[in-house]
Image (cartoon, rainbow, N blue to C red):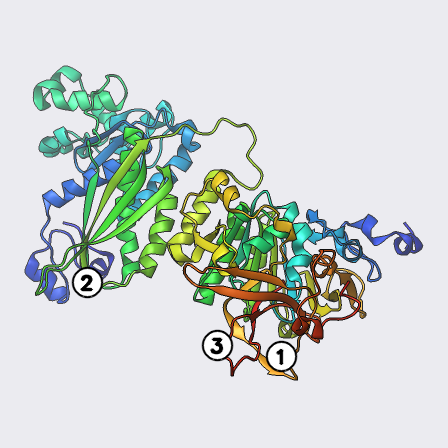
Amino acid sequence: MALSPAAHAAGVQSGMRRGGVLMLMPEARILERSHAREAEALQAVALAMLQYTPQVALAEEATLLLDIGASLRLFGGIRRLCALVRANLQALGFTACIACAPTARGAWLLARRNAGRAVRMASLVRRLDRLPVSLLPPARPFAAWFDGIGCRRFDELQRLPRPGLQRRCGRALLDMLDAAYGIESEMFRWVQAPEHFRARLELFDRIEQADLLLAGAHHLVLQMTGWLCARQLAVERIELLLEHERGRVARPPTPIEVALAEPTWRDEHLMRLLRERLGKLVLEAPVIGIRLEARKLQAMAPPTDSLFPDPGGSEEDRVRMIELLVARLGADNVLQFLPYADYRPEVANAWVPVQHAITPSARAAQMPPDVGSLPRPSWLLAKPIALLMRDHRPFYGSPLRVASNPERIEAGWWSQTQTRDYFIAEGRDHALYWIYRERINGSGEDATPRWFLHGLFG
Amino acid sequence: MTRSDFTSAAPESLHPSLWRASQLAHANTRCVDTGHATLSSQLPGGGWPSGTLIDLLVQQPGIGEMRLLRPALSACAARRIVLLQPPHPPQALAMAALGLDPAQLLWLRSTRSADALWAAEQVLRSGSCGALLFWANHVRSDSLRRLHLAAQGGETLFFMLRPLAAAQDASPAPLRLALRPAAGGLHVDFVKRRGPLREAPLFLPLGSSLLQRHAPLDRPVPAPVTARGLQPSLAH
């Protein structure tokens, strides 16, 4: 029986009956223990832990054993590794007692007692000697007998004659004791990462705001990280499926697809992208479950072998920044220039989403040959502004004075004909404007020249 | 050490971040040459400081601000140049004529100002871009401070282009210039710099090549409509 701190404060204690609990705390929610879900949770944690070591074993009484002997250098020492594991567990939504010891059974015993880390064998023996005998599962049926002969701690147990102890309590107790003290070795069945990754999380409540799903998504992404590390893969495309409540009509799950230009196996970048995507999403119906699938996988790329980092970050950093910008602003708002060989300025100035791959040769082929000789304004108005006429001069804030020779642009007879004479004009405040005059006016009577402002010289 | 030794010692010999009110400060970051010798000599460090917020207060968009920044931008054009929320669609051919590689330009649009601030911060934090030009009208001073802090983490040239009215508001930027158009160039007012106060605006010649580009062409005299507004000095 487990209880929350709030229940503990209300006076509920373990071992109470249901009626007693409800009398003390009428609003208490009493849940049945579900062994299947416990096993599922342990499996999820084991999968996430595979990112720290490939040797993860499930042990009895809801514990996991990790062989971290080979991982200490990589993750920067035992304290840092413990902190990482603890942070991951917290992100997964679990609390855990973490212990380290030179022997697996010793670590198991320390964790069951929440007795901390013992890095050397001598300190492990010191700590083990103080543990109560009832911590060993094979000793529990004989608890009364041990109590009767005054044998309460491990050191007292060690002092008993071994043949007699084996006859009374069986072989298992001695084996476990020897394994804890490192006298005998132990065999484990390591957790195998499954062939395909697919994880699902049932939410505790109906969720109506998309950004609240982030914690759940993190839970799944952490599992995927462990799986990717164990199988030496990197992910290129993931899909997060939001399962909706089955209302009057069955609703298909909402997919959120995240595609990466650079395959990754770390969770930080994926979480940042998912955060932006979820932040923008408007849910049509409450969500009751989420599912994560890895759609496209690649072998993990080895780290770069250059000695010095590039100034201004690597190409990977650049790609990541752009992906992050696209995730929040939308693909239509992160634009690059696509040159197009056309005389009409609006058509030549085409901007396309940055994901379009444009080869430098294709770009160069569409650029005008002598770009420096073209008088083009830095800012091209999205729509030309018709200018007022005052004293037969175009007027924009102040009368404009034409300051250059005309540039005649006449093109587009196949779609939108443009017959324009472009001038650089100067206002009274000496700002430069790019203005044009329509050469073909309507009919004869309104043949006054029509002037438009089309650009600003930045 | 006697009291006279204290007063005679130059402040910069005591600590590099000290300077007299009558002299320009030393830059403690890398500076990019502005390309205009008269302007560079008026700036602490002799150029645009990288990794700091530089406030450019422009009277209106399109008065020559890009021509002013051209030498500095082409110096860092090997990396991307991000145009965040420009007032009008940028014309890449003009940027190419200014000497910037159009393939390195990135145009970011945003509908909400919170998104624009977020994007600016991401670009600065990533540090993989050469320059960031951010047009904004109303920015609160805490957002400015945040952006300034983000800029200090990297080497990105960071310009904020804001309207002239923003000169009244406080800003954490160590360098603030106000730009006004002038005949054939720009008037630069030093609103704030680490150095002596300068009242008179600095005139920078900019646009002469733009207007006389077509002058030597062998063409018939333009149509009478165009000739009307032409200055005799410019019509060769």
Q: Are marks 2 and 3 in contact (CB under 8 Å)?
A: no
Q: Which mark is residue A395?
A: 1
Q: Which sits in the foreground, A284 or A143?
A: A284
Disc 3 is placed on an element classified as loop
Specify few, some or many for label 2: CA neighbours under 10 Å numbering under 14, 14-19, or 20 or more: some
Quadrant in which residue B36 is drawn: bottom right
Q: Residue at 20% across / 20% down in the picture?
A: A187
Point out which mark residue A286 bears. Answer: 2
- Label 2 marks a residue whose chain is A
Q: Nearer the viewer, residue A110 or A325?
A: A325
Q: Are marks 1 and 2 on the same chain?
A: yes
N-term mark: 1 or 3: 1
Mark 3 Cα shell of 10 Å, populated few (<14), some (14-19), many (≥20): few
Asked if one can make out residue B51 in the rendered structure from this viewpoint, the answer is: no
Q: Position of residue A250 (x, y in %)?
A: 10, 59
- Dividing the picture into quadrants, the one containing residue A148 is top left
Residue where numbered disc 3 is placed: A442
For badge 3, the amino acid type reads Gly
| Image-based side of A426 in relation to A422, left or right | right
Q: Which mark is residue B191?
A: none
